[in-house]
Amino acid sequence: MTTFHELFGHAPTGEWAAPGRVNLIGEHTDYNLGFVLPIALPQTVRARARRRDDGRLRLYSVQGDGRVAELAVADLAPGTVAGWAGYPAAVVWALRQAGHPVGGADLLLDSDVPTGAGLSSSAALECAVASAYNDLYGLGLAAQDLAVVAQQAENRFVGVPCGVMDQMASMCGRAGTALHLDARDLSIRHVPFDLASAGLRLLVIDTRTRHDLADGAYAALRAGCERAAALLDLPALRDVPPSGLDPALGRLPAELRPLVRHVVTENERVRRAVALLDAGDPAGLGPVLTAGHASLRDDYRVSCPETDLAVEAALSAGALGARMTGGGFGGSVIALVAVGAADETAAAVAAAFRRAGYPEPGLVHAIASAGARRVS
Ligand code: GLA
């Protein structure tokens, strides 16, 4: 592998790592200022980095095209940097926009977070770079602040109107726990998530599908939720209590009702999931996950034939619960299974995919792991 020294002519100051994430429950609730419950994955983006004082940002990715991208920090502007290099550039731009006078750096990036699988490889990349800059420039920002910078980078520079879940999970995850996040005030609590001692496993099945409508549809759904909140005279759909759901639906046009129903019931599923984990009953999550999938499929309409099939096949093979995870229109499915049934479940999903003529699904065994950190 090309070394930092070969690329840039000197040694790095250090190495930072930030993980991908998988969301247990709480989908499309973050931009409605509700609740989410993701875990950080063992798979990370690693950034070896050294500060430069000449305003140049030099970027190299082991997964890239073998070339060093070189940019002038002062010239960074939304829409000017295409491809993967746009994410690190976006973070540097967003730090400067937030008033932090950061300059250039040499960055060597390497990743084992699967891309295009809905496991937030881009948030991991942003958070690795944000963590490196925080230390290289002595910014002293807290993990939550860095997550917001990374989200701003993605919203305003890359142009993806995502919520804050992925960046918060990558920055604030903790081994052996799930992250209960209130997306309104960014308060967090680490909830015990110990599957091994309950004899369980969480399979992440990558359908290897990503439908083209994903980006446009995400923005349209977010706009629909904001319109519904405005029609209800509320700051966000988070403010519809479960007891107020039916009256709220009665005040909305037909096309917005399923969106609101999903968001309100999904926030309740997060509450339920947290209560189960606090009570030491992770197996109880199963039906909550499966109900979440039905809501995403029937009300929010972000599932697709591949994710629906993976869920059905996992459940038929004996999974305690299963659902699509992430934004939707492809990506990954999670399945909660007894340890002894994990291989059988994975094989059943693969067989169903073969019969349907779908690509061979990928498989990751999800272990709740640490959030962003300096590793050397
Ligand atoms: C994507 C976004 C997140 C969140 C999920 C859906 O992963 O990046 O902010 O909205 O979709 O829950």
Image (tube, rainbow, N blue to C red):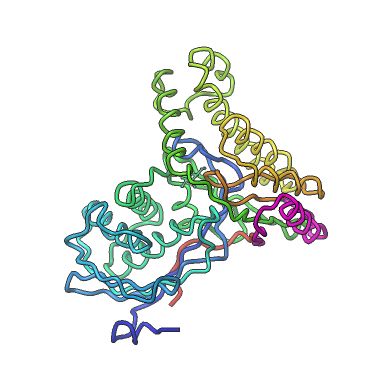
Is residue 11 depicted above or below 97 in this figure? below
For the point 39% across and 72% down, the residue is 65
360 inside magenta stretch: yes
> Magenta region: which residues?
336-365
At 50% from the left edge and 23% from the top edge, which residue is drawn?
Answer: 240
Residue 337 coordinates in the image, percent (x, y): 76, 53
Q: Main secondary structure of the magenta part?
A: helix
Is-magenta flag for residue 293?
Answer: no
Instruction: Tell me: 345 left or right of 44.
Output: right
In the image, residue 47 sits, relative to residue 167, either above or below, namely below
Residue 64, picture quadrant: bottom left
Q: Nearer the viewer, residue 229 or 189?
A: 229
Nearer to us in this view, 361 or 105: 361
Q: Please tell me which residue is depicted at 22% across the width and 63% down the height of the picture.
A: 102
As displayed, is residue 239 above or below residue 68? above
State left or right for residue 85 relative to residue 75. right
Which residue is situated farthest in the front direction here? 357
Which of the pair 95/303 is nearer the observer? 303
Picture quarter with the N terminus: bottom left
* 68 left or right, relative to 248: left
